[in-house]
Image (cartoon, helix red, strand yellow):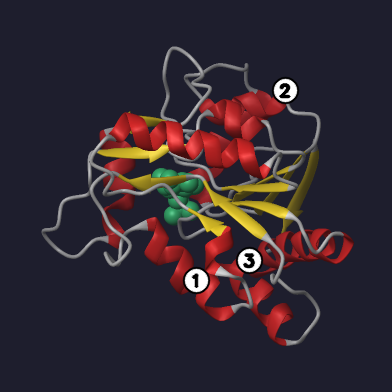
Amino acid sequence: MIIYKEESYEKMSERAAEIIASQLMMNEYSILGLATGSTPVGTYKKLIEMNKAGKISFKNVKTVNLDEYHGLGPDHPCSYRFFMNDNLFNHVDIDKKNTNVPDGLASDGEAECKRYDEVIKSLGRADIQILGIGENGHIAFNEPSDHFSVGTHIENLTQSTMDANKRFFEDGEKVPNSAFTMGIGGIMNAKCIILLANGEKKAKAVKDSITGKVTPQVPASVLQLHPNVIVIGDKDAMKFL
Ligand code: GLP
């Protein structure tokens, strides 16, 4: 595990974007596993800048996102498809046909999970999987549990996750209480995982995940078992390391 403690969110984002850009420079046909949330926004901004400057191209890149709220469609401003379009895809030379996010509106949830696992399988191992982390140690929407889930599934969100994500929703609008999420197996299948964390609120989850015991009660702790993880955090998130 490589750990970078950066001075600021800006520096964290720069470091992550540089690593992802190097991957795209090495292989223009890279497969990227992407994450949502406020954490990777700065990284995506830097990648957009590099793309506009002609340093990297997404023309042949394929992407697979981690998760999507159950019940939210691509036009809903809080859906993760909307987020990805708005924060990355609409601003780079990617072919949206090469981007994948679970369909939050799928009427048959189980069939959608199967379909998404097929998508993941057909793409092959992601070259880089970007991850944020929840305050309770969740990754994607894999909440603390008594087991690690392997495949894509529908997860009931914990109150703490719904409370943390309330800030993205309009006043009075309810955060969906379930979501489609890639399983821990899908995440661990990536060749390289970059875990990003910023802000003091993440410090305990980062410490428990990196230095605590591996347990599904702290889903991100499973990353200790992956051979190629890069943790990049700002100094507040990394204060206990
Ligand atoms: C959501 C997402 C996660 C993300 C987490 C942290 O629950 N499903 O993928 O890592 O929030 O979000 P933020 O970066 O906004 O703190």
For this rendering, which residue is in front, 121 or 219?
121
At 24% across and 61% down in the image, what residue appears?
169
Residue 153 placement, left or right of 50:
left
What's the amino acid at mark 1? Asn
Give the x, y percent position of residue 152: 46, 31
Quadrant housing the C terminus: top right
| Number of numbered callouts drawn | 3
Which residue does the image show at 31% across and 61% down from the upper left? 78
Image quarter for residue 19? Answer: bottom right
Q: Are marks 3 and 2 in contact (CB under 8 Å)?
A: no
**Mark closer to the observer (1, 3):** 1
Label placed on residue 45:
none
Quadrant containing the N terminus is: top right
First of labels 2, 1 by sequence position: 1
Q: Earlier in the sequence, mark 3 or mark 2?
A: 3
Residue 133 at x, y = what percent?
A: 52, 43
Judge whether 146 appears above or below 220 on screen.
above
Q: Which mark is residue 225?
A: 2
Q: Are marks 1 and 3 in contact (CB under 8 Å)?
A: no
- The secondary element bearing badge 3 is classed as helix
Q: CA distance from mark 2 to mark 1?
A: 31 Å
Instruction: Answer with mark 1 or mark 3, whichever residue precedes in sequence.
Output: 3
Instruction: Kindly identify which numbered label has been placed on residue 87.
Output: 1
Q: Is residue 208 visible?
A: no
Quarter-wise, where is residue 159 in the image? top left
Which residue is under mark 3?
43
For badge 2, the amino acid type reads Leu
Label 1 – label 3 distance at C-alpha: 10 Å
The residue at the point 23 percent across, 39 percent down is: 177
Q: Residues within 10 Å of mark 2 (few under 14, many from 20)?
A: few
User: In the rendered structure, which amino acid carries the disc numbered 3?
Assistant: Thr
